[in-house]
Image (cartoon, rainbow, N blue to C red):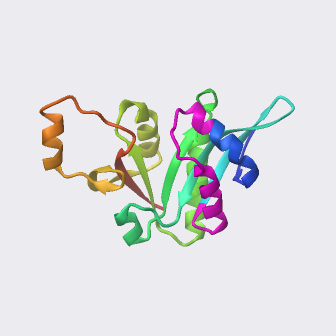
């Protein structure tokens, strides 16, 4: 049995463990800042918690950010799902879907009619790309973004055609869904 619930400060160590299991790189104090922003009602962090031995362990999390840094979502008042992670040994159980649904339900309750999400463009994000499409998310029409800023094609020519491109997790596509 897996429960989805709102994270607390007591979950910070578990959030870092998941992040480490996912090979994510976060700045020092990242989850402490996220919990503080949750306390300020700027975001909500949902965790997936499973029974493990005699206790419970965190196996995934997601964040619902009410005022994203991506200018288009911010301007249109679209909240954004960010940082969805489920550890590898807990995948295939529908936890990613359930975490997304928790965010969507919260946004609907707050009167929102659209939800945003972004996903990396590299192969490692393939499962997430497929999940988001299955959940009804479509590209917002902006094309690629790098660190929440739309990428202009002229800037790509020099990198893509003259050398081997180096991509990282900041190259994304933004997607939206009507709620």
Task: Residue 85: give x, y in percent of width and height.
Answer: 56, 40
User: Which residue, as the protein is rendered here, is positioned at the far right?
Assistant: 54
Residue at 18 percent of width and 43 percent of height: 156
Q: Is residue 143 visible?
A: yes
Judge whether residue 101 is colored magenta: no
Residue at 52 percent of width and 37 percent of height: 24
Q: In the rendered image of this protein, does residue 38 appear above or below residue 54?
A: below
The magenta stretch is: 18-43
Q: Nearer the viewer, residue 39 or 136?
A: 39
Q: Nearer the viewer, residue 82 or 156?
A: 156
Q: How many marks?
A: 0
Task: Residue 113: give x, y in percent of width and height.
Answer: 47, 68
Residue at 53 percent of width and 44 percent of height: 26
User: Which residue, as the protein is rendered here, is positioned at the far front?
Assistant: 28
Left or right of 31? Residue 121 is: left
Judge whether residue 29 is colored magenta: yes
Q: Quadrant of residue 20?
A: top right
Q: In the rendered image of this protein, does residue 134 appear above or below residue 161?
A: below
Task: Residue 102: give x, y in percent of width and height.
Answer: 61, 54
Q: In the rendered image of this protein, does residue 103 appear above or below residue 99?
A: below
Task: Residue 168: give x, y in percent of width and height.
Answer: 36, 38
Left or right of 100? Residue 74 is: left
Q: Is residue 94 visible?
A: no
């Amino acid at each position: 049995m897996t429960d989805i619930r709102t994270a607390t400060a007591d979950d910070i160590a578990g959030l870092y463990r998941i992040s480490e299991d996912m090979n994510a790189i976060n700045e020092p104090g990242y989850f402490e800042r996220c919990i503080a922003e949750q306390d300020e009602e700027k975001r909500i962090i949902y965790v997936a918690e499973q029974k493990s031995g005699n206790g419970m362990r965190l196996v995934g999390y997601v964040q619902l950010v009410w005022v994203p840094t991506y200018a288009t979502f911010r301007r249109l008042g679209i909240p954004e799902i960010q940082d969805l992670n489920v550890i590898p040994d807990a995948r295939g159980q529908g936890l990613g879907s359930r975490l997304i649904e928790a965010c969507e339900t919260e946004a609907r309750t707050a009167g929102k009619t659209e939800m945003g999400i972004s996903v990396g463009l590299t192969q490692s994000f393939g499962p997430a790309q497929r999940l988001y499409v299955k959940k009804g998310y479509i590209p917002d029409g902006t094309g690629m973004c790098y660190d929440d800023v739309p990428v202009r094609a002229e800037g790509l020519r020099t990198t893509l055609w003259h050398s081997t491109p180096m991509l990282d997790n900041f190259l994304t596509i933004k997607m939206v869904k009507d709620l």
